[in-house]
Amino acid sequence: MSKRRGDKMPLLDHIREFRDRLIKSSFAVFIGSIAGWVYYQQIIRLLTLPFCDLGSATSPANGKCGDLYVNGILGPFNLQVKIALLTGVIASAPVWIYQLWAFITPALHKKEKRVTVSFVLVATPLFMTGAFLAYVILPHAVQVLLGFTPNNLGNLIRFDEYLDFVLRLILIFGIAFVLPLFLVALNLLGVLSGRSILKPWRLAVFLCFLFTSAFTPTPDPVTMTLLAIPLCLLYFLSGLFALLVDKRRYRRNDAESRLTAIDKPEEI
């Protein structure tokens, strides 16, 4: 059922739409998970490289790399399922990002649909950039956390716990990089103005650092700052872009109003 801006949509239709988009997103994740299942060994190798080189007998210079292990009979199987799902979520990011945006916005006109397509085209590389940044800082995060290990003790780490840590870091970084784009998309749809985006900039900066401190799975300030600074930059860039869009929209509306005033016959 199509719906236009300003029209009301029954609750059951909202539920059906949510169900349909959830099914599409789940199917995309499933397809990506198949690739994660097939390339399981290569992905495991890639995920463990920031931690330590398990293929060699040497350890990092600080001697606090620790040993990763899989526990239980079902441990290897559960690990492969988690790896496959992680791969599916990341690989299917363009699909579920589009489904999420299409659900939270009303049925769009032709021009607004182009905004949605542009949103997905920009959101996907932003999500991947955040995930890549998380992978880059992962060795530093591991080094900081393992630095609390006493000198006279070893450190045995379950790989599923390490995987949960990596998963949280990658998803949080990826989603955080997409959040400012929602502001730009809402501005293009005429919901938010650039001034309303930038007006609470102090609160926005505080919330960026609060978000990183609350959801980043490492307590060190370096990791939190590495995430908070790009978020703040993306926030200000989205606000400046929204101001440019507002300025252009104001000029267009002003020109249209003048043309309307000229074409409108004078009342006698």
Image: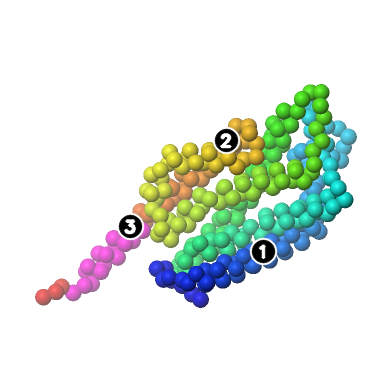
Give left or right: position of 75 versus 264.
Answer: right
Is the residue marked by circle 1 packed among few (<14), some (14-19), or many (20+) residues within 10 Å?
some
Q: Is residue 262 magenta?
A: yes
Identify the residue shown where x is 63% and y is 57%. 93
* Marks 3, 1: nearer the viewer: 1
Where disc 2 sits, the SS reads helix
Is the residue marked by circle 2 packed among few (<14), some (14-19), or many (20+) residues within 10 Å?
some
Does residue 109 lie above or below 141 as drawn?
A: below
Indicate which disc residue 250 carries: 3
Which amino acid type corresponds to the residue marked 3 in the rendered image? Tyr
Pointer 1 residue: 26
* Of callouts 2 and 3, the N-terminal one: 2
Q: Magenta residues: mostly which secondary structure? A: helix
Q: How far separated are the C-alphas under marks 2 and 3?
A: 37 Å
Pointer 2 residue: 225
Q: How far separated are the C-alphas under marks 3 and 1?
A: 41 Å
* Of callouts 3 and 1, the N-terminal one: 1
Which amino acid type corresponds to the residue marked 1 in the rendered image? Ser
Q: Between 111 and 161, which is closer to the camera in this rendering?
A: 161
Give left or right: position of 156 versus 168.
Answer: right
Identify the residue shown where x is 86% and y is 48%. 72
The region drawn magenta spans: 249-265
Q: How far separated are the C-alphas under marks 1 and 2?
A: 33 Å
Q: Quadrant of the C terminus?
A: bottom left
Q: Between 241 and 20, which is closer to the camera in this rendering?
A: 20
Q: Between 72 and 240, which is closer to the camera in this rendering?
A: 72
